[in-house]
Image (tube, rainbow, N blue to C red):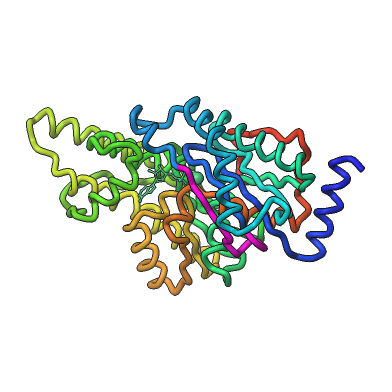
Amino acid sequence: MTYQESVRAQAEKLIASGHARILAIESSCDETAAAIIEDGRKLVSSVIASQIDMHALYGGVVPEIASRMHVEALDPLCDQALEQANMTMNDVDAIAVTYGPGLVGALLTGVAWAKAFAYARNLPLIPVNHIEGHVSANYIAHPDLEPPFICLVASGGHSHIVRVDDYGSYTILGGTTDDAAGEAFDKVARVLNIPYPGGPLLDKLAEEGDDRAYTFPKVVTPRPYDFSFSGLKTAVINQAHNLRQQGEEIRAADFAASFRRAVVDSLSKKAVAACKDTGITRLALAGGVASNRLLRREIERRGKKAGLDVFMPPAILCTDNAAMIGSAAFYQLMKGSVASLDLNAIPALGLM
Ligand code: KG4
Ligand code: ZN
């Protein structure tokens, strides 16, 4: 029997049983991660090797360094994930890997590793979309959450409002027309001399600031669920430069708080509006920016006011991790989505 015939038969058995223990790999950007997820919802183990210290030396992600560090981290991380789960390779039913979107070299390291593992162990290989992974983090955190629901996905490269129609089935209601929310956070952080990665540190600083201290332009977009952060980002950066030129001190905490308020107001208002307009009463958060403290509070507040049930994964499942990839993979597997060994990385992979 060929590899392909053998894994097809195995996948069919898993689908019939409705159970699978999946070893998932994530390497799309600057975090290498491995996790074991059971039946899409149960987090058995999850380990993450962050490259932040290395990229911080350069003020941002250096793709070639990211790829090389993934190569070094993948083997030991996989061992750690199995060890933490008290499992051996023999207990794994399938391998999942992020194949896009992301940095091509970084993605390729995970894809090549997962293909080799799948072939060597004769296991089904499940290709996972990174954005779908972010959405699926909610399935781990909230065992009762089922589609349909609205999900606000905000990360370093993406900002979308998505209607999750079913497992693995999405309608994009809106998205950013320019910068992603995380990207805007990172760029403004740089102007405030906050080291990479700027978003989380800017968020922390903003907690001590007055969000009415500085006035920035309102974000306007022609379509109701779209975002635009580039104009806001430029206005904020220009204001910082002007203040500096006039010899005025920038109160960094107030500045960070005012900027964060502008971004979070736009994200949270539009996400809640999408629920109201579609009549869907469940709203979930996903992506690195979903760990933003103000965004979490505002989604809770506005969501409650609108009578919505609000879902958000803990911060560690919002930023890049492999547990979310294992969750998305389970539902892909149950639909029969198994990759062949010519799977390639797709850096600009869309959600649909
Ligand atoms: O989802 P993620 O870990 O990686 C991507 O898929 O991009 O998101 C990373 C992005 C970065 O831009 C980071 O600055 C931002 O999420 N981020 C935050 C916070 N934590 C991470 N932005 C604002 N507030 C935070 N607490
Ligand atoms: Zn991500």
Our reading of the magenta stretch's main secondary structure is: strand
Q: Residue at x 73, y 45 (%)?
A: 125
**How many dots with numbers?**
0
Residue 335: name its quadrant: bottom right
- Asked whether 42 falls inside the magenta stretch, the response is yes
Q: Is residue 352 visible?
A: no
In this view, the residue farthest toward the bottom is 307
Q: Left or right? Give the position of 340 relative to 110.
A: right
The residue nearer to you, when weighing 181 against 194, is: 194
Give the percent coordinates (x, y) of residue 82: 61, 53
Q: Residue at x 61, y 59 (%)?
A: 86
- Asked whether 34 falls inside the magenta stretch, the response is no
The residue nearer to you, when weighing 177 against 12, is: 12
Q: Residue at x 56, y 32 (%)?
A: 71
Q: Residue at x 62, y 32 (%)?
A: 108
Q: Which residues are magenta?
A: 37-49
Image quadrant in which the N terminus is located: top right
The residue nearer to you, when weighing 108 against 332, is: 108
Residue 127: name its quadrant: top right
Give the percent coordinates (x, y) of residue 29: 50, 37
The residue nearer to you, when weighing 58 against 54, is: 54
Q: Is residue 303 visible?
A: yes
In this view, the residue farthest toward the top is 64
In this view, the residue farthest toward the right is 1
Image position of 264 with respect to 71: above or below: below
Q: Left or right? Give the position of 292 relative to 79.
A: left
Give the percent coordinates (x, y) of residue 242: 16, 31
